[in-house]
């Protein structure tokens, strides 16, 4: 989960309040999936317990959530380490895609037909993402590009697998 | 040219541009064997498929650059495979525009003159043609570059000049064969955005040959060419 790191990063910029952090997260990082208030406060609580953020005193007259959070040097170190660690390059091969091809061949159905359908579904997604980029903000375009390249990677795999279907069938039926 | 293929029942005249059961060989190489394709006015359709599958040959047959060995091609309700060479050249000049991968600008001419060229060939007055060319250059974000030769333009700029030249006659169909093939992602994206925006604004249909999914993403739909045949999930249009 990257929510704790997102909060540390936002706090490294400047000290902030829980509800502000939620707003910043939702508008820049949430990708249309807002983080729950509960999760924000729970995470802040855990970070405070571990000494990665410090909690200011509640402002007088404010609600119970008017606590200002700041990052500690321990927190900064944690955030920097996270940022400097590349994400494991997961093989993005969708297991289901792969399973369908192999199963189709094993049970003697048309893997080609399945790949054609899959390709056209993927291309439809590419069209949608491309259309969505037109009026989007730069942040949303970046996200759309990321999705586009991933869908494209699947399509390459689909093309290559199609070109190898005969050989694959021979190997599976040996 | 004798033609043994039956006239398609639904009527190719129902579509703007049609290839019906087209065959084309180059010596021993069969490039197309029974390819069918249709596009309607204003549509943007991507022709995809592996390299060597016959995409460019199909585009050349649709555009009247190549004559099919067998089968029919139609444009605006008329057979085009039966036209004499002169009439097909005339049709291409009046109704079609072209954007290719590279090497299409005349190096001796300025950007402005390159864009104006199709109008000049069609007999427009030079002053009017150059004025129209300047308007296109502006529209494509190339104002101030009208005097440059193709050697003084970046790949993306040259491709935008080619786009202006392809669209300046307000063609019914723009044929684009790998129009971003030599460009990087960001530049290619810009060219595709301009290409589809301009074509849609003019009501020009686009036959877009590409093997790149992200380029095909700018189309309304796609067809796949495989071993000289077209397969499509849009069966209605694929079989006229
Ligand atoms: N002018 C030509 N002379 C000889 N062979 C050709 C010619 N044009 C195309 N071909 C052959 O026809 C087949 C289809 O080519 P093409 O339509 O260019 O494929 P694509 O555009 O899908 O890569 C290929 O095998 C190619 O080598
Ligand atoms: Mg080609």
Image: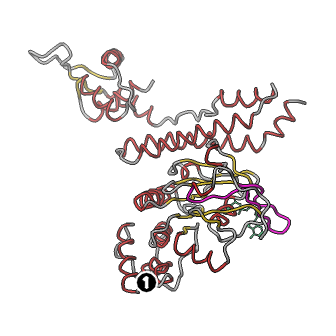
Residue A163 picture location, percent across and down: 76, 45
The residue most toward the right is: A174
Compared to residue B207, the image places residue A21 above or below, namely: above
Q: Write the residue at 62% across / 44% down.
A: B236
Q: Nearer the viewer, residue B78 or A136?
A: B78
| Residue B28 counted in the magenta span | yes
Q: Is mark 1 within 8 Å of ligand 2?
A: no
Q: Nearer the viewer, residue B86 or B78?
A: B78
Compared to residue A132, the image places residue B228 above or below, namely: below
Residue B69 picture location, percent across and down: 77, 66
Compared to residue B112, the image places residue A142 above or below, namely: above
Q: Quadrant of ligand 1?
A: bottom right
Chain of the residue that carries numbered disc 1 in the rendered image: B
| Magenta stretch secondary structure, dominant | strand
Q: Is residue A106 left or right of residue B166?
A: right
| Residue B192 counted in the magenta span | no
Task: Check disc 1 and report the residue beneath it.
Answer: B124
Q: Is residue B55 left or right of residue A170?
A: left
The span shown in magenta is B15-35
Q: Is residue A28 left or right of residue A100?
A: left
Q: Nearer the viewer, residue B59 or A28?
A: B59
Dot 1: few (<14), some (14–19), or many (≥20) neighbours within 10 Å? Answer: some
Compared to residue A75, the image places residue B3 above or below, namely: below
Q: Secondary structure at mark 1?
A: loop
Q: Write the residue at 35% across / 79% down.
A: B131
């Amino acid at each position: 989960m990257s929510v704790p790191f997102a909060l540390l990063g936002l706090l490294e910029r400047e000290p902030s309040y829980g509800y502000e952090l939620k707003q910043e997260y939702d508008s820049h990082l949430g990708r249309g999936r807002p983080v729950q208030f509960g999760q924000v406060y729970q995470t802040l609580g855990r970070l405070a317990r571990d000494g990665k953020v410090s909690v200011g005193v509640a402002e007088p007259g404010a609600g119970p959530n008017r606590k200002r959070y700041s990052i500690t040097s321990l927190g900064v170190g944690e955030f920097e380490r996270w940022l400097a660690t590349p994400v494991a390059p997961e093989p993005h091969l969708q297991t289901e895609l792969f399973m369908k091809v192999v199963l189709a061949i094993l049970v003697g159905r048309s893997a080609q037909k399945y790949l054609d359908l899959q390709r056209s579904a993927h291309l439809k997604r590419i069209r949608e993402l491309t259309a969505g980029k037109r009026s989007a903000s730069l942040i949303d375009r970046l996200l759309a590009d990321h999705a586009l390249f991933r869908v494209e990677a699947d399509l390459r795999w689909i093309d290559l697998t199609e070109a190898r279907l005969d050989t694959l069938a021979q190997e599976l039926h040996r | 040219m004798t033609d043994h293929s039956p006239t398609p029942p639904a009527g190719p005249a129902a579509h703007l541009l049609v290839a019906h059961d087209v065959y084309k060989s180059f010596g021993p190489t069969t490039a197309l064997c029974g390819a069918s394709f249709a596009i309607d006015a204003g549509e943007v359709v991507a022709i995809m498929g592996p390299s060597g599958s016959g995409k460019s040959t199909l585009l050349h047959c649709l555009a009247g650059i190549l004559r099919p060995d067998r089968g029919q091609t139609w444009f605006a309700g008329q057979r085009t495979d039966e036209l004499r060479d002169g009439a097909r050249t005339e049709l291409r000049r009046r109704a079609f525009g072209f954007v290719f991968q590279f090497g299409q600008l005349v190096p001796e001419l300025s950007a402005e003159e390159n864009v104006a060229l199709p109008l000049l060939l069609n007999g427009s007055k030079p002053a009017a043609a150059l004025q129209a060319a300047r308007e296109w250059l502006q529209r494509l974000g190339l104002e101030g570059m009208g005097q440059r030769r193709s050697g003084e333009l970046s790949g993306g700029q040259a491709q935008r000049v080619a786009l202006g030249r392809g669209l300046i006659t307000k063609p019914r169909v723009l044929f684009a064969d790998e129009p971003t093939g030599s460009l990087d992602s960001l530049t290619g994206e810009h060219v595709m955005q301009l290409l589809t925006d301009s074509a849609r604004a003019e009501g020009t249909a686009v036959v877009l040959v590409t093997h790149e999914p992200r380029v095909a993403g700018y189309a309304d739909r796609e067809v796949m060419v495989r071993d000289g045949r077209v397969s499509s999930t849009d069966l209605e249009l694929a079989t006229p």
